[in-house]
Image (spheres, coloured by chain):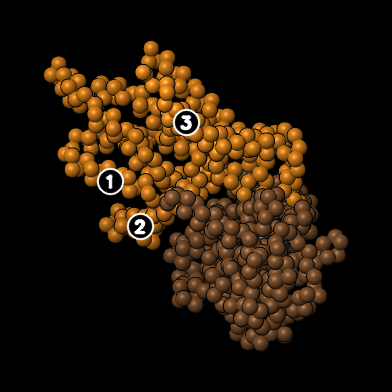
Amino acid sequence: MIGPRTYGPRLIGGLAFGVLAVFFVIPLIFMIVVSFYQPDPMGFYKVDFVWENYGKFFSSFYYTVSFRSLYSAALGAVLVVALAFPLVLFVSDLSRRMQLFWIILLLSLMCLSEVIIGFAWLILMSESAGLPRLLEWVGLWKNPRSLSPSFGAMMIGLVFLGFSIVSLILYPSVSRRDRNIEEAAVTLGTPPALVFYKILIPTFRTSLVSVTLTMFVYLLGVFVMPTMLGRPKDWTMTVIISDKALGDANLPLGAALAVVMLIVTVLVLIVSALLTRRRAT
Amino acid sequence: MGIAYKLAAATGAIVSLTSAAWAQELTVSAWGGFFEETLAAEIYPGFTAETGIAVRSIAQPEDSTWMTQLMAAARAGQAPADLSLVVDEVLIRGNEVGLWAELDPAMMPGTGNLKDGYVQLNDAGKAYAVGALAFYTTFVTNTNYAADAPSSWAELWEPKWDGKLGIVTTPNSGLLEVTAQTFFGGYDILETRDGIEQVIAKIAELKPQVSLWYRDEGQFQQSLESGELNAGLYYHDVTMLSVWDGLPVATTFPAEGGIVSDAYWVVPRDSENIAAAEKFLDYMSRPETQALMARMMGTFPVVPRDSMDLTDEEFDAVGSDIAPIRVQTHIHLREGDWLETKYQEMIAQ
């Protein structure tokens, strides 16, 4: 009597697999194929098999940019999680009504487009209308300068983008946690200030690591924040790839750079997964 | 049933979008924003009134992005628009891969009014593009911070801008040619890679002064108008609109000239409305239409000045008699990836 007669789940699973194959795997394969084509500055590209596009990655410029991308995505991911986790803990202890308020607030932040967020921060950090002008008015800053474009401005943009996503991923498990463990720790003499480090962080270590990795991958692909809020020195690989593929209409080089970034990302993820697994056992 | 109905409606919408052939309707694309809106509101209605051919105006993205989309569409045997506005780099690259339909000048007598060279011929001697308009990029300033208009492009290199310059990121902005003209006595230096590197090194001296290397025009314009930026390179026509709106900005043609860019109309190869498109090109090439565009959009006409009824004041608002600086497209195409990478490294390293 136990279920193999229903085809529903299999059908849904098959459908999901089909959609994934059509909309993810096929474009990916196409991208890999294009990355071996010969770019044609007078036209578009010629169907060919050359390693030239990959060869170009190994100039100092491109790997400087890719290290820079990995660095800012990693730093951004760690900052987002470091800020969002305490907030989620705080929210989860509030009344039901206040929790709902925070959830709706976080959800509505997710509706904003990257460009709108970028422009809002541009204005907030401008010397004519934003924070610098306010500081001058209060008397804290004599000769105010615009705070963007800068690395810090870009980081704020990245953190803002990721904040609600991370909070909403962490919220369900954090709000359902067993609070008896914290109480027991305090009863047994742990100073309340240390409960966060000794109890909460170890309890949620796995989900914190996985959400940090998710954020890392997400921030690696962000385009608008580096171009709007960052200096040219902060531009990430995403910006360079879009400049190549769209700006210069050099799809093969853009595709090759994207494939390299994909490989690097997958390697980083595998290494971190192995490291966390080893520590868990 | 609801889903079936929606599907049918969606299919209907797609079919009516892709096959404009059944009605006398032309799909014309132009750069999105003010340009496309003004063309649709002020210029196309005259054509429809005269010929009875309706014009569906659509917005197209930035040049290379649009070319990428046109190429992809051509591979699928489709034309996203019957007519499209492109700059010469896209025009030449598209012609090289046979992206544009051939046109018959006899069917568009109006093109006889154009200045020489504005009907582009392919290797077989057939016309494939017709000059649409020209536009200038000039030295723009915020008048609250720079009261005097700059007299030479060399002033960009002076330390007075307080680190508040805004410059385009792409190498085909005309800055290479401006630098060659201002400091190296002409475009000849750009003929060798050695020379190009010298010019790029000169541009690199601007880096401490440039706080925004922009790719988004809106961001530059907003920053210049608010005083966040004090000066930079920007479109003359758009800046004139801000001037007329009373904003504290100015646009100046320096002694070496403004940077001129030409835009052409092309018909994608797979368009099914070539005859109607030729009528459209005939209309757009007439001096009356060119004068109307100058008045309404601030673009620089591609017909001789004496064939139009523009007053001196109207002419001075859209251009200048100073010989312009012209982007050396053949060099940009020849040096392609090498030049783009050198330029990008200069900016981003």
Q: Where does residue B169 sit, x and y in percent of width and height? A: 59, 53
First in residue order: circle 1 vs circle 3: 3
Chain at numbered mark 1: A
- The picture places residue B344, in percent across and down from the top left corner, at 62, 47
Please say if B87 is above or below A12. Answer: below
User: Which sits earlier in the primary sequence, circle 2 or circle 3?
Assistant: 3
> Looking at this view, is B32 or B254 the one in front?
B32
B20 vs A122, left or right, is right
Residue tagged by mark 2?
Answer: A130
Q: Which mark is residue A112?
A: none
Q: Residues within 10 Å of mark 2 (few under 14, many from 20)?
A: some
Chain label for disc 2: A
Q: Which chain is orange?
A: A
| Chain B shade | brown
Instruction: Report the front residue among A279 and B46.
Output: B46
With A83 as the anchor, is B131 left or right in this view?
A: right
The location of residue A218, given as percent across then percent down, is 46, 37
Residues tagged by mark 1 and mark 3 found on one chain of the structure: yes
Q: Residue B221: x percent and y percent? A: 50, 64
Q: Quadrant of the C terminus of chain B?
A: top right
Foreground tag (1 vs 3)? 3
Residue at numbered disc 3: A11
Question: What residue do we see at 68% from left, 76% from top?
Answer: B284
Residue type, numbered disc 3: Leu
Tally of marks: 3
The disc at residue A104 is 1
Q: Residue at 22% of width from left, 35% of height from top?
A: A92
Check disc 3: other Cα within 10 Å, few if <14, some if 14-19, many if 20+.
Answer: few
